[in-house]
Image: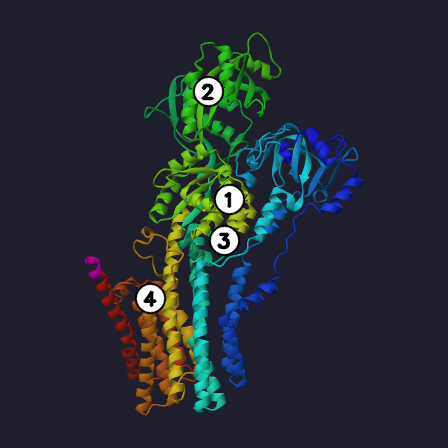
Amino acid sequence: MKEKYQLTTAEIKQQLGLKEFTQGISSQEAATRLQRDGQNALEVKPTPKWKIFLRQFNNIVIYILLVATLLTIMIGHYTDAVVILAVVILNSLIGYFQETSAANALAKIKEMMAQHATVYRDGKRQDIDASDLVVGDVVFLEAGDNVPADLRIVSADNLRIEESALTGETNSVIKTDEALTDDKIPLADRVNMAYSSTSVTSGSGLGVVVATGEHTEIGKISQEVAHIKPKKTRLTREIDRVGTIVSYITIIGSVIIFIIGFFLQIYSLPALALAVVAMLVGSIPEGLPATTSVILAFGVSKMAKRYKTIIKSMPAVETLGSVDVIATDKTGTLTKNEMTAIELWSGDQHYTVTGTGYAPQGQLMQDGHQVEVDDQLKLLLEAGFQANDTVLSEEDGRWVINGEPTDGAFLTLYHKLLGAKYQSAYEPQDLLPFDSDYRYIAELTRNTENNQQVIFIKGSPDKLFEMAAKDDPAFDIQKWTKRVNDWSVAGKRVIALGFRVVEGENLMEIEHDHLYQGIHLLGLAALQDAPREEVIAALKTMNNAGVAVKMITGDDPQTARAIGQQLGLAPGEIHAITGAQWDRLPAEEQAKAAQDNQVFARTTPQNKLEIIDALQRGQLVTAMVGDGVNDAPALKQADIGIAMGIKGTDVAKDAADMVLGDDNFATMATVIEEGRRIYDNIKKSILFLLPTSFAEGLVVAFSILTAQQVPLQPVQLLWINLVAAITIQFAFVFEKAAPGLMNRPPRPVSSKLMNRHDLIQMGYVSALMAIFALVAYDWFTGHDASVINATTMMINVIVISKLFYFFSIRTTGNGLKQIKTITGRAWAVIGIMLAFQLILTYTPFMQEAFHVTGISLVEWLAVIVFSCLIMLVAEADKWIRFRKENENGAN
């Protein structure tokens, strides 16, 4: 069956039951089709916020804490119950606000649908709600309209439609009503189709509705976005895994201890229950989600302030650090999306032009030296300036165009080389607009100095060469064609320029026949969407860091490959594949092609999604950078989606996890480094937090098994786990990046958060903390200290031990020597923790709430001595380990 773009206008009439396009369908038939097919609208069903909040409780750590809350209420320890429940609610609120902070991309897509449409029904032209459009409706389009549904164009009068949000192409597309014979034509090349959410920039035309609602191209994108389920980041999965394993170990250990205590009748049942609750609360790392969130939140804040980068999902910060591949759009991301004339052939003189973008700043160069504009070149500049229907202006210190990028490049070139205040001697009289059938634009002008009429023309080289040959039989078409080919191979867009002096008549308007009589060719201009200078440096940094960058574009593969080479997309040769070639590959070959190619040209939105999926199937953590509606599914599918803040559509921003506020792709290298730093610090904080939780559980378990009074109560354990531990952990927020961080490759997908040595270290540190705390407790009770006094000592031994352990774990080198590298803000955090500990120990209301008492200076010295031992053992372990590694390396 033929695609709609392959049908002739007669076939369209027959297939959709139309007699005449200006007659349209009847109102009765429209109502029948509306009933059958449904409204031309997209359904958006957001998740209720109450459901989002409730699912934050679907976590094994939360389950354990809720059980602990229930048990403490049953045995009458209401203060403990309130504190534990507060921890549960705090963790749930953190998760809730993270999940609801991301906006709904589907809602934004729905907003892009046109609200009204002008149609022919019952032979009358009328305005209706766009949602009431049906297949077969004939829609009238004119400049300024948003296309309300997918249309097959059946009549076009210089109709141009801007489709960049859907296809990625920057230039408006000239539309025609002619049938296209080829099959599998890319979306961007279907010149007889108009798609919902695109906009008419000039001209007018008629289009027959061939798809509405979810069946339109934007509707398909909406469905793809809806079907892609949110994914947990690697860090979130790893932390969940750690929390689950620790929770299971804690539950099993608590059940075993309870059974032993129950059968040995060591305690009364309420006392045993309280002891087991203490073990549960002590062993569960309640502070893990909060600590991780705080470190991520500081990273998010830093990126927003320093790098103008908005992170919508906090775990996405860390995902940046583990990224293996960045797939990115070209236009406006790697390039400026500002066409620039960079080389000129004026007659047989070759010039280069400095400066990029639309700012009229640059110089004319020849053989490396600045030169002046001669009369021949001035005429070429006039041709580019006059044969033009675009406006260049300065807004808020930035040069912008209203019109086509190609035309904008010639306006900039004119003012760049002739001066911003230069006044042309030529007055415009009549414009022949660009037409896809003729592929040129021409302007009839009058020279005010000699009253002579001149036609300036600018367009496709092959068209102008044909005209030049009619004017001059000796015209060397081979020489000029070679110049065009040389530039085209280098990825440059080539435009030819010419003029014709009107002899013996006074024209009122210009026609195509005037040009086909012959023109004088002035020369050629090579245009390029200039690569961003900062991107070239960033790509070099990414290559050093082992991060591959893939360019996905709607451009011609030859052009895209050349730009990739200029950018330094990869260290070696740039390999390219087209969307059509990709479609013919089986799934297993697509996975290989996704890794082997750096450039993906002439792609569809579906191709982008498939490329991301193929990279992920290859076990690669993948980021997607985009700005259009067509990028939304890939942005959501990627491990981290990144949208442009200035030129990006609302749909792209809402589907993404991160927004580059200044559209600067080079920021990616900086945020990748920041992501790696954050991951390192989160790992350190987890390795720092868990030994304390294990130590507390061991203290309680040992006390139960030896039939001794449990020295720590649940509320005291929560103080250690939340207030003291998390306060110190905040210091990890300010840890600087390790040297050489961007010279190491991304960590493999198969890597675990904790390696074998990390587990061994956690084991001996938790055991030592428990042993030193119990020894301190027994020593003090053996020297006639009260139980409450000894308990206070034990709490402070565990807390201060954590402080000394922090000095060791924050660096792989000598912890004592590296203390000088601790930042001032980290010292401030440590000071706050010590202040909290003093408040706990000496403030009456805290003493009563937490069952502690004041201790003497001698007792504080004992606390410090016991606590120092932890750091000394950890430092000795590092020294032995690195010595062995150096010996093995030497061998």
- Magenta segment includes 324: no
Picture layout, residue 265 above or below residue 430: below
Residue lying at 46% horizontally and 51% vertically, measured from the top left? 617
- Amino acid under label 2? Leu
Q: Which disc number belongs to residue 657? A: 3
How far apart in space, not on screen, are marks 1 and 4 (Cα)?
39 Å
User: Mark 3 vs mark 2: which is more N-terminal?
Assistant: 2
User: Mark 1 vs mark 4: which is more N-terminal?
Assistant: 1
User: Mark 1 vs mark 2: which is more N-terminal?
Assistant: 2
Q: Quadrant of the N terminus?
A: top right
Q: Can the viewer see residue 517 in this picture?
A: yes
- Residue contact between numbered discs 3 and 1, judged by CB atoms under 8 Å: no
Discs 3/2, front: 3
Q: Secondary structure at mark 2?
A: helix
How far apart in space, not on screen, are marks 1 and 2 (Cα)?
41 Å
Q: Which residue is mark 1?
A: 608
Residue lying at 59% horizontally and 21% vertically, measured from the top left? 432
How far apart in space, not on screen, are marks 4 and 3 (Cα)?
33 Å
Q: Which residue is mark 4?
A: 756
**Residue count near mark 1 (Cα–Cα under 10 Å), binned few <14, some 14–19, many ≥20:** many
- Amino acid under label 4? Arg
- Residue contact between numbered discs 4 and 3, judged by CB atoms under 8 Å: no
- Between 9 and 812, the residue placed more toward the observer is 9
Q: Which residue is mark 2?
A: 380
Q: What range of the chain is rendered magenta? A: 887-891
